Image (tube, rainbow, N blue to C red):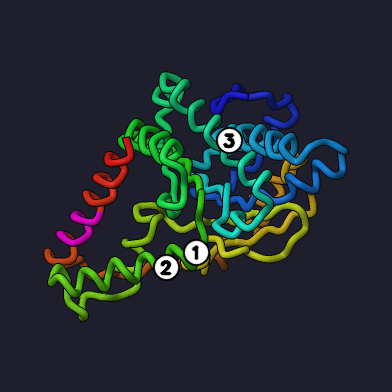
């Protein structure tokens, strides 16, 4: 299946989408796509087929989000903890990821026409050179797009992200780029892999598991959390609409209190700009 799919909503589904759009729509939704392996077991197919069905569901879900006006989506595609699975399954997942990132490049015209910015967040040093190269090409190709954003958490855990952020800030203090007094919550947020993205309004986890699995722990302090009993490949437009409706009902309580942020001083601003340049340079080195 293509990363960019055409709308397949029925007239009644489109009507319900339009009704939901009368209320506040989340800007950013994150998904823990859980249940691919259990789907395979349930349907008596190979685990690889379950993961393929999971990818197909992601493509469909991205289209539903666009229909709703959700401009940013983050998906938990592969945890660092997943490397502990059997070597055969890890190899299958890496092959599938390689195939799908190649698909991004093959669909350059479509993705650029839709203005989709694709960002891969995670510890890319844990991946093969081929995957690093493909990820770098996709990220650099789409970095200036701004109509929609897809963040793919790959070789990711929140603990690893926070550890990397702390190391980045410590190094900044050590080399004199910033001072200890410059360190605050805003600086930490700006140094995360997700720098530049708003915190998720909703986080959805499928398969009935009620845990966050080390996903975006810094970023979801004010997010609406929706646990769905359905396995990820069986996720439907109705499940998504239910999550958005729940968000709308809780919106008055979820709305973040607007605070006056202190303008970053020139030193911090320069440090953050250098950090972004370093990350771009790292991506270019993979190609």
Rendered image quadrant of residue 176: bottom left
Query: What residue does disc 2 label?
Result: 162
Q: Which residues are magenta?
A: 270-275
Whether tag 3 and tag 2 are in contact, CB under 8 A, the answer is: no
Report the Cα–Cα distance between label 1 and label 2: 6 Å
Crowd rating for badge 2 (residues with CA inside 10 Å; few <14, some 14–19, many 20+): some
Disc nearest the viewer among 3 and 2: 3
Q: Is residue 117 above or below residue 203?
A: above
On whether residue 271 falls in the magenta region, the answer is yes
Residue for badge 3: 95
Picture quarter with the C terminus: top left
The spot of residue 11 in percent (x, y) is 72, 24
Tell me what residue is drawn at x 49 percent, y 48 percent.
27
From what the image shows, is residue 150 above or below residue 161?
above
Q: Residues within 10 Å of mark 1 (few under 14, many from 20)?
A: many
Q: Is residue 7 left or right of residue 157?
A: right
Q: Does 249 sit left or right of 159 as displayed?
A: right
Q: Position of residue 280 (x, y in %)?
A: 27, 45
Residue 250 on image: x %, y %:
62, 62
x, y percent for residue 281: 24, 45
Quadrant of res 174: bottom left
Residue 268 is a magenta residue: no
Placement of 175 over or under 46, stated as above or below: below
At a point 68% along the width and 24% down the height, the residue shown is 8
Query: On the image, numbered disc 1 is attached to which residue?
Result: 158
First reached walking from the N terminus: tag 3 or tag 2: 3
- Look at the numbered disc 3 and give the secondary structure of its residue: helix
């Amino acid at each position: 299946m293509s990363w960019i799919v055409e709308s397949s909503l029925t007239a009644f589904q489109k009507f319900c989408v339009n009704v939901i759009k009368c209320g506040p729509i989340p800007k950013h939704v994150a998904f823990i796509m859980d249940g691919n392996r259990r789907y395979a077991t349930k349907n008596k197919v190979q685990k690889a087929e379950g993961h393929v069905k999971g990818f197909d569901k992601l493509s469909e879900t991205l289209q539903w989000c666009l229909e709703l006006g959700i401009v940013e989506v983050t998906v938990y595609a592969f945890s660092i903890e997943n490397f502990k699975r059997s070597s055969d399954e890890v190899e299958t997942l890496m092959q599938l990821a390689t195939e799908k990132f190649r698909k991004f490049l093959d669909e350059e015209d479509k993705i650029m026409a839709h203005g989709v910015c694709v960002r891969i967040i995670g510890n890319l040093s844990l991946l093969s050179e081929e995957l690093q190269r493909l990820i770098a090409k996709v990220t650099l190709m789409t970095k200036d797009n701004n109509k929609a954003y897809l963040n793919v958490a790959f070789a990711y855990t929140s603990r690893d992200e926070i550890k990397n952020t702390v190391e980045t800030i410590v190094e900044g203090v050590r080399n004199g780029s910033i001072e200890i007094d410059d360190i605050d919550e805003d600086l930490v947020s700006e140094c995360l892999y997700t720098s530049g993205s708003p915190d998720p309004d909703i986080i959805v986890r499928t398969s009935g598991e009620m845990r966050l699995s080390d996903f975006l722990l810094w970023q979801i302090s004010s997010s609406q959390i929706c646990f769905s009993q359905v396995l990820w490949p069986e996720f439907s437009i109705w499940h998504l609409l239910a999550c958005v409706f729940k968000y709308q009902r809780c919106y008055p309580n979820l709305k973040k209190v607007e605070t006056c942020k202190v303008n970053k001083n020139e030193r911090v601003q320069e440090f953050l700009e250098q950090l972004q340049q370093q990350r771009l340079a790292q991506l270019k080195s993979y190609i």
